[in-house]
Image (cartoon, rainbow, N blue to C red):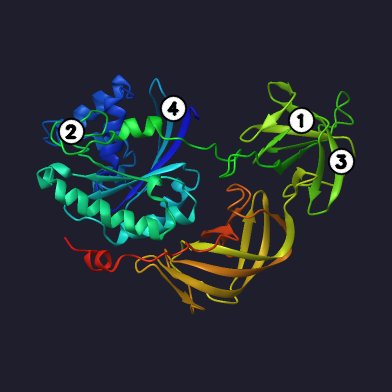
């Protein structure tokens, strides 16, 4: 079992995500005393008898004033069993782009629903985004269970509806867990609640501590190691008397491992060489792994620059100027065929043109629309792009880090979309007719 779990929260506005995260931090004693004192004072100023735990997460002034989460808030906490990196993402539809950011590296997502409202449109949208991003496990936290008098029937109905929806998106039933919670009162968050004697499952923290996870960036879904990938960020040439012949290639290891003596290939040029040394600010390494920032030295003097990819020679990605991908469209303006954009993959940015919109995914009805005229804000679609120059690409299902990219507006540099190389739209298995009819029922 990994000793680190990366997780994200998602859900609609006012479902209680920030309060839930605050409750986790508060009840696991992961809050510094001065921070807790500040929350107590702010809560008292608002006339509250108990601390508003959402203030532990909502750090922007605009978030505190509006009572909503706008940016992604990252928090770290730990228990004796495991450490956690948590991304608390916004619930408002306007900030779905930030949900994509927060969930892009998550190994598990906690999706909240209000027990009084059940599964709503934004719940289904977030579930579709999480499925598309390949987040392998979901927790449905049915929050505010205290406001429906801890009713078992209400919880069971919501759990059944959501499980059917998640299954239709490709999740197996053992990958989805439903837990009745009250973030405000603390029911089933860290401690077992006496108010839900009918619930026999784990608390949220118990599940997070014990769920099996796979290491992102170093393992595929089948558990085998990923091949070495290293996007070059910078070429180091000191040109001092001491380092006259020094030529190093700095960057972050995106996947796999590398050690001196390994044969590598530089893409897109296709030139080959051997790693002779691995440098870091703290000294030389005998091996580097995914997530480490290092400088590689090679046996041969090759023309390498920022944007090139160094990969293991016998298992390199495909180099192509034709890209099939799924996009999560994040911009106010529409995407239409013929649009000229920039594609940023790793450390390389190239010009591209959208040659075709192949289909658009309707996350509400779990269906697809062939050849749509456009993609609009928060829509998901499969597209074809032609790149101005060849780029080394892995399939997203093979590697999250080297199978993803950004679409950028060439005119102002703003991010337009998150792209997944070769990622098919969720494989739809259909929903039970009775559940379809029940969706949206209060």
Counting residues from the start of the chain, the first of labels 4 and 2 encountered is: 2
- Mark 2 lies on residue: 43
* Mark 4 neighbour class, 10 Å CA radius: few under 14, some 14 to 19, many 20 or more: some
Residue 390 visible in this rendered orientation of the protein: no
- Mark 3 lies on residue: 273
Counting residues from the start of the chain, the first of labels 3 and 2 encountered is: 2
Left or right of 36 in this view: 406: right
Q: Nearer the viewer, residue 58 or 177?
A: 177
From the top left corner, tell me how far across and down residue 287 is, in percent: 72, 27
* Mark 2 neighbour class, 10 Å CA radius: few under 14, some 14 to 19, many 20 or more: some
Q: Which mark is residue 83?
A: 4
From the top left corner, tell me how far across and down residue 160 is, in percent: 26, 54
How many numbered discs sit on the rendered protein?
Answer: 4
Left or right of 364 in this view: 302: right
Counting residues from the start of the chain, the first of labels 3 and 4 encountered is: 4
Give the CA separation, mark 4 to mark 2.
29 Å
For discs 1 and 2, the disc positioned in front in the rendered view: 1
Give the residue displayed 22% in from the left and 30% down from the top. Answer: 192
Position above or below: 295 against 155: above
Give the CA separation, mark 3 to mark 4.
39 Å
Give the CA separation, mark 3 to mark 1.
13 Å
Q: Secondary structure at mark 4?
A: strand
From the top left corner, tell me how far across and down residue 422 is, in percent: 60, 61
- Mark 1 vs 4: CB contact within 8 A: no
- Mark 1 lies on residue: 259
Give the CA separation, mark 1 to mark 4.
28 Å
Q: Secondary structure at mark 2?
A: helix
Give the residue displayed 42% in from the left and 39% down from the top. Answer: 7
Q: Which quarter of the rendering shows the C terminus?
A: bottom left
């Amino acid at each position: 079992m990994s000793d680190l779990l990366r997780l994200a929260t998602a859900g609609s506005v006012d479902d209680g995500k920030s309060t839930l995260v605050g409750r986790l931090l508060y009840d696991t004693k992961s809050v510094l005393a001065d921070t807790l004192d500040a929350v107590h004072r702010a809560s008292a100023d608002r006339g509250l008898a108990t601390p508003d735990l959402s203030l532990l997460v909502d750090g922007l002034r605009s978030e505190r004033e509006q009572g909503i989460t706008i940016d992604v808030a990252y928090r770290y906490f730990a228990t004796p069993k495991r450490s956690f990196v948590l991304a608390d993402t916004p619930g408002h539809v306007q900030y779905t782009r930030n949900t994509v950011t927060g969930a892009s590296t998550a190994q598990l997502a906690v999706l909240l629903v209000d027990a009084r409202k059940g599964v709503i449109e934004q719940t289904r949208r977030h579930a579709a985004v999480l499925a598309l991003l390949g987040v392998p496990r979901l927790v449905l936290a049915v929050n505010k269970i205290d406001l429906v008098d801890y009713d078992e029937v209400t919880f069971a109905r919501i759990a059944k509806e959501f499980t059917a929806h998640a299954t239709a998106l490709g999740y197996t039933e053992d990958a989805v867990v439903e837990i009745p919670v009250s973030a405000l009162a603390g029911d089933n968050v860290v401690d077992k609640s006496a108010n839900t004697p009918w619930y026999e499952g784990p608390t949220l923290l118990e599940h997070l501590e014990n769920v099996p996870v796979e290491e992102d960036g170093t393992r595929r879904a089948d558990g085998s190691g990923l091949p070495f990938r290293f996007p070059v960020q910078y070429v180091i040439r000191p040109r001092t008397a001491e380092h006259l012949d020094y030529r190093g290639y700095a960057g972050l290891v995106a996947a796999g491992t590398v050690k001196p003596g390994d044969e590598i290939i530089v893409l897109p040029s296709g030139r080959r060489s051997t790693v002779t040394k691995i440098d870091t600010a703290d000294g030389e390494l005998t091996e580097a792994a995914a997530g480490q920032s290092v400088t590689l030295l090679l046996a041969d003097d090759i023309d390498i620059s920022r944007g090139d990819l160094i990969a293991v020679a016998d298992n390199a990605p495909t180099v192509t100027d034709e890209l099939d991908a799924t996009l999560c469209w994040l911009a106010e303006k529409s995407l239409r065929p013929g649009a000229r954009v920039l594609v940023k993959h790793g450390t390389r940015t190239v010009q591209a043109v959208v040659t075709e919109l192949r289909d658009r995914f309707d996350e509400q009805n779990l269906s697809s629309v062939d050849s749509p005229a456009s993609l609009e804000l928060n829509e998901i679609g499969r597209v074809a792009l032609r790149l101005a120059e060849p780029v080394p690409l892995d399939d997203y299902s093979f590697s999250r880090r080297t199978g993803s990219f950004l679409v950028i507006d060439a005119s102002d540099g703003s991010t337009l979309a998150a792209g997944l190389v070769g990622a098919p739209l969720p494989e739809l298995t259909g929903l039970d007719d009775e559940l379809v009819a029940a969706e949206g029922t209060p």
